[in-house]
Image (spheres, rainbow, N blue to C red):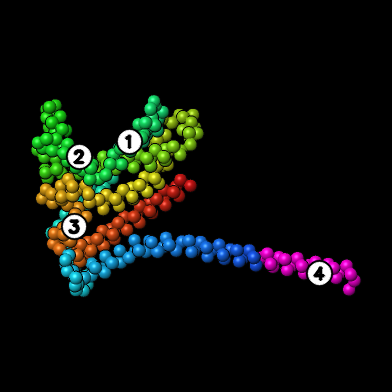
Amino acid sequence: MNDKSFIAGNKHVSRSRSSAVRGGAFRFSRRRDRMTGILLFLPLVALMVILSFYPVFRVFTLSLQEQGLFSQTSRFVGISNFIRIFQHEGFWRAFNNTLVFSFGGLALQTLLGLGIAMLLHARFPLRNSVRGSLLFSYLVPYVVAALTWRFMLSDATGVLNYAIRQMNLPMPASWFGSPQWAMPGVIFVNTWKNFPFMVLVFLATLQSISPELYQASAVDGATRWQAFRYITFPALVPALLIVGMLRTIWNYNNFEVVFLLTQGGPLGRTETFPLLIHRFVFGEFSMGRGAALAIVVLAILFAMSFVYWKLYETAQERLS
């Protein structure tokens, strides 16, 4: 072997060793970054377990036991609590009331939010000020909103009732005490409180649609309705499904508005699942039945969320 071959061999070995060292350092760096990411993620996982999964597990175990509100002892009863709540006289009434309250409010909030978002998407003087003012009702606490509307719609001293009487318009004898008007009343107050959320989401989605699509449709002779049907609405569907899922969950779990306005009355016409859980625990002192109904509500919301998510995936596939 001559000197040149020896030198070339040494250079090849050196390059191989350098590549191996660099490869090993790169793999070590990746493992170190992965471990750092896991260590940084662990506190969040622990927090989720403490704040989310453990309470759900605790409620599930409690649903299989019979325990009083002020009792320190419990007795395992299996699925008896679930059987008892399905046989309870208020379960199916609360089920229907919750559906009406949740989806009635969702429909009204969606229509109102979409209409106002379409108006605010156009250019006009003081547009930013008007947009900011819409957040007022969303920032008002539930307690303040419910008590304010209860006072304004009071039978004796309500300012809105006084205005309606002065205009000689038909009005119910009692907004929140009438079996026919109590549910529309709580839906109205809940809609007034939460529709700005829908406006914000729809407005952000409208602003993300390219103006060139509308220009091209105008060149092709499309009307405003056709532009909305074939351009605006398909772009809004994914956002509509996401906020629909969120608002359905929030409406389904809403306790404050109904409790502060009607406390589930009159004659149980506005008693929803959260109020029935409250009655089981604090009225009948049965922690087990309250926990069992909470698990049933959780299962219903999981099923609804699954349907919403499948519809969202379908809408995304159509857009792509």
Residue highlighted by disc 1: 134
* Mark 2 or mark 3, earlier in chain: 2
Q: Is residue 4 magenta?
A: yes
- Range shown magenta: 1-23
Residue tagged by mark 3?
278
How many residues crowd around disc 4 within 10 Å: few (fewer than 14), some, or many (20 or more)? few
Pick the front one: 18 or 88: 18
Residue 67: image quadrant is bottom left
Residue for point 43% across, 31% down: 222
Please state which amino acid type lies under the numbered disc 2.
Thr
Image position of 113 with respect to 22: above or below: above
Q: Which residue corresponds to the image point at 16% horizontal and 66% vertical from the top-left?
A: 70
Q: Residue at x 60, y 63 (%)?
A: 29
Q: Are marks 1 and 2 in contact (CB under 8 Å)?
A: no
First of labels 1, 2 by sequence position? 1
Q: How far apart are marks 4 and 3 (CA)?
A: 82 Å
Q: Which of marks 1 and 2 is in front?
A: 2
Secondary structure mostly taken by the magenta-highlighted segment of the chain: helix
Counting from the top left corner in percent of width and height, residue 114 is at: 34, 38
The local secondary structure at tag 4 comes to helix
> Where residue 59 sits in the image (x, y, percent)?
26, 65
Amino acid at circle 4: Asn
Label 2 sits on residue: 148
Q: Crowding near pointer 3: few (<14 within 10 Å), some, many (20+)?
A: some
